[in-house]
Amino acid sequence: MRRQVAAGRRVRGDPRARAAVSVRAGTTAGPEPSSVDAAGRAADRVQRPVVRDRIADAALVIVTGAVDLAFWSGDRDLIGGGVLPLWVVPAAAAALCAVLLLRHRFPLGVWVLAWLYTSVNLFVPEYYPFAYLLVASYAVATRVPGPTARLVLIAAALPLGLFGYRTAQSAAPEAQLRDFATAAASWAIILSIAWGLGRLAHAREQHARAERERLAAEAEKALAAQRLRLAHELHDSVSGAVAGMILHAGAARAVCGGADPRVRQALEVIEQAGAQAMTELHSMLGLLRSTVPADPPAARFADIERLLESARNAGLDIRVDRTGTARPLSPAADLAAYRIVQESLTNVIKHAGRGAAVTLVIDWTDRALDLTVRSRGGQPTPAPATLSSGMGLRGLRERLDVLGGELTGGPDNDGWRVHATVPAATTAPMELS
């Protein structure tokens, strides 16, 4: 992500880069300062929320540890006898703080560790580490299905009920039942609030995902309608004009009789070229009117190795760097990720050619799939038709806008760089074949 911001700032500050093509503006031959600035601003918009989220996450974890330590009286006596070393509780609290940072990726695993840590009250009666369990329960509620989340809620109530029992033990015998009921009800309310907020966040995320998919479907429908209108216009205007040209050329050739052979040859060329143009035009109209999706549904990001192998066979020297754990993508995002790599490699073959060195960085984060394609060197050559997605980076950028992602491109030292952020689904990690 830092590399993306640096590239955006380089583009804004380098006069040579201002003459480069911005993916957001399409291909131009001259400077496009506003488009280049837009690419830098897009990188900043992606970077700032991630940095803020990480800072807020770290602050929440630190506050959680501080709250739990604040509820420790300092008494280190164990129920079975003996004294706990002074360093054990702070060290364990710090370790669990580090574990809590992983709750977005492994919510259930972190919750189990928090549950076990909260149960330490069985052995250290003066220590009530409840905040860890609340934060972990919230994380589980935001990321797992309803039945599992409800089981987590019930299980989390057990150690908190133990806290109520410990509280009642210190009261007079006649007040113990009342104190236990009061404490248990208080803990139940606190836990229910944390869990309920998590389920609310889960519902909002599900709604937002459904809305993104609906917008993507509407965009595809609008694109299909636009293609159909274009097909009608081509048929009504261009097709008629070309057909008329063919008829006139044929008629002129038929009546010219013994005219100069060069004239007859020129008319034959016109007639043949017109016939070929009509054939190609009819083929284009068939594609525009086709109800088959422009993108084959079989194309998935998990199939990226086959695409890379095709590019290597075309003469590219490709290195792939992978970081993070692969996560699920929505069907539209999955296809967009594949097309971004496909179109980037096609452009490298067209503009850099055989022998070009390409680095593909695949970086999985909690929220997105970051793709970076860098190219250097090579000799320009026509790209194989099997590599091109037929959309262009501008079309892919528009598709990513609908999905909530970003795509930027620009010069990178002596080469070219394309960076895309593809939103990931907020579910458990997956394995790529």
Image (cartoon, rainbow, N blue to C red):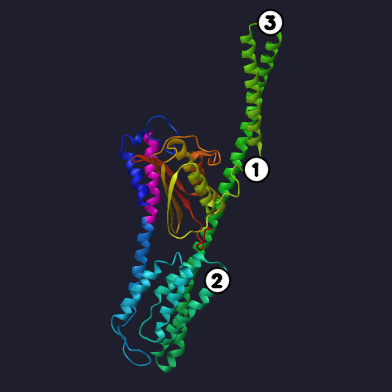
Helix, strand or loop at mark 3: loop
Helix, strand or loop at mark 1: loop
As shown in the figure, which amino acid type bears the numbered disc 1?
Val
How crowded pointer 3 is (Cα within 10 Å; few <14, some 14-19, many 20+) is rated as few
Q: Nearer the viewer, residue 62 or 431?
A: 431
Q: Nearer the viewer, mark 1 or mark 3?
A: 3
Q: Nearer the viewer, mark 2 or mark 1?
A: 1
The x, y position of residue 293, in whole percent, is 62, 43
As shown in the figure, which amino acid type bears the numbered disc 2?
Thr
- Above or below, comparing residue 286 to residue 56 in the picture: above
How crowded pointer 1 is (Cα within 10 Å; few <14, some 14-19, many 20+) is rated as few
Residue drawn at (65%, 25%) of the image = 278
Q: Which range of residues does the magenta coloring cover?
A: 32-50
The x, y position of residue 265, in whole percent, is 63, 13
Q: Which residue is mark 2?
A: 148
- Above or below, comparing residue 8 to residue 283 in the picture: below
Q: Which residue is mark 3?
A: 258
Q: Nearer the viewer, residue 101 or 163?
A: 101
On the question of residue 29 being in view, the answer is yes
Residue drawn at (34%, 65%) of the image = 59
Between discs 1 and 3, the one toward the N terminus: 3
Between discs 2 and 1, the one toward the N terminus: 2
Q: Nearer the viewer, mark 3 or mark 2?
A: 3
The x, y position of residue 139, in whole percent, is 46, 67
Between discs 3 and 2, the one toward the N terminus: 2
Determine which of the numbered discs, if any, sits on residue 292 in the image.
1
* Pointer 3 with pointer 2, Cβ within 8 A: no
